[in-house]
Amino acid sequence: QVQLVESGGGLVQAGGSLRLSCAASGSIFLIYDMGWYRQAPGKQRELVATITSGGSTNYADSVKGRFTISRDNAKNTVYLQMNSLKPEDTAVYYCNARLRIIGGSPGDYWGQGTQVTVSS
């Protein structure tokens, strides 16, 4: 009923930039928070950044000053602009949305993940 489709991952050299996008579609009544998480090989999934429907943001300390999260509520889309990328940013990046489907209760939904690889 709900799909989150990510795009924009890829291979980039250290110091470079990438922009991730995630579009939510389906039987959506209302989207609350949206965010990005990442999981590196052998590590647990961790929060990267979140943004509320009103535009308040929260970042992991490791990405503050380098990454910027934004959203377009009209398009049900969240973005992650990643600058000054480091090899330790290499991970699968997952989009998350807390939303209410039509006729349903709020719940958490995840995208399929997009690979970001930063070479040194």
Image (cartoon, helix red, strand yellow):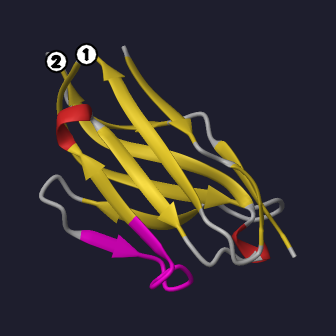
Residue bounds of the magenta highlight = 57-68
Q: Residue at x 34, y 22 (%)?
A: 25
Q: Tell me how many marks there are.
A: 2
Where residue 85 sits, quadrant-wise, is bottom right
Q: Secondary structure at mark 2?
A: loop
Q: Position of residue 35 (x, y in %)?
A: 39, 55
- Is residue 66 placed above or below 40 in the rendered structure? below
Image quadrant containing the C terminus: bottom right
Along the line of sight, the residue nearer the viewer: 102 or 68: 68
Along the line of sight, the residue nearer the viewer: 27 or 43: 27
- Is residue 106 placed above or below 78 in the rendered structure? above
Q: Position of residue 76 (x, y in %)?
A: 27, 35
Marker disc for residue 102: 2
Outermost residue to the right: 120
Of pointers 1 and 2, the one earlier in the residue sequence: 1
Along the line of sight, the residue nearer the viewer: 106 or 40: 40
Q: Residue at x 43, y 45 (%)?
A: 96
Q: Residue at x 45, y 85 (%)?
A: 65
Q: Are marks 1 and 2 in contact (CB under 8 Å)?
A: yes
Q: Is residue 63 left or right of residue 14?
A: left
What is the CA distance from the residue labelled 1 to the residue labelled 2?
Answer: 6 Å
Q: Position of residue 116 (x, y in %)?
A: 71, 55
Residue type at numbered disc 1: Ser
Kindly identify which residue carries mark 1: 27
Q: Is residue 106 visible?
A: no
Residue type at numbered disc 2: Ile
Q: Residues within 10 Å of mark 2 (few under 14, many from 20)?
A: few
